[in-house]
Amino acid sequence: MVGKFRSKWIGPFVVTNVFPSGAIQIKSIGTGKVFKVNGQRLKLFNDSSMPVEAPAEELSLDKPSYTPAATP
C-alpha cells in the first residue's frame, strides 16, 4: 500500500491528437511513449522554463465538435 496514493503519471506530456469521443493521445516528453487517455483526466501544465515549439491551440473539452471526413 506504499504506492497507493503515489501519482501514476510522470510528465509532462504533449497532446498529439484529439479524438471526437473525447479521448486524447499524449506523448511523454521524457520517454517518447504514446498513450491514449480520457480528456477529462488531464490537467493543464504550465512551465515557463520549457521551450515552446509552436503556439498552443486551446481546445474546449466541454463542447466537443465533430467534423466528418469527406467521402470520395
Image: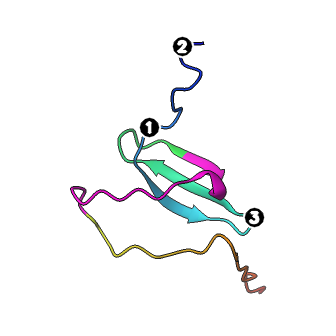
Q: Which residue is mark 3?
A: 21
Which amino acid does the dot numbered 2 rest on?
Answer: Val
Instruction: List x then y, in percent, for residue 24.
Output: 61, 58
Q: Which residue is mark 1?
A: 10
Where residue 3 sits, quadrant-wise, is top right
Measuring 78% from the left and 85% from the top, which residue is drawn there?
Answer: 71
Q: Nearer the viewer, mark 2 or mark 1?
A: 2
User: Does 58 sit above or below residue 14?
Assistant: below
**Residue visible at 29% across and 67% down?**
53
Tag 3, which secondary structure? loop
Q: Position of residue 35 (x, y in %)?
A: 57, 46
Which is nearer the eye, 8 or 13?
8
Residue kind at label 3, given as amino acid type: Ser
Q: Amino acid at mark 1?
A: Ile
Task: Point out the tag, 2 or 1, that comes first from the N-terminus.
Answer: 2
> Toward the viewer: 13 or 42?
42
Q: CA distance from mark 2 to mark 3?
A: 35 Å
Quadrant assignment, res 5 = top right
Mark 3 packing: few (<14 Cα in 10 Å), some, or many (20+)?
few
Earlier in the chain: of badge 3 and badge 1, it is: 1
7 displayed left or right of 12: right
Real-space Cα distance between discs 3 and 1?
Answer: 24 Å
Residues in magenta, as a range = 35-51
Tag 1's secondary structure? loop
Residue designated by label 2: 2
Marker disc for residue 71:
none
User: How many callouts does the rendering have?
Assistant: 3
Residue in the image at 49% along x and 60% along y: 15
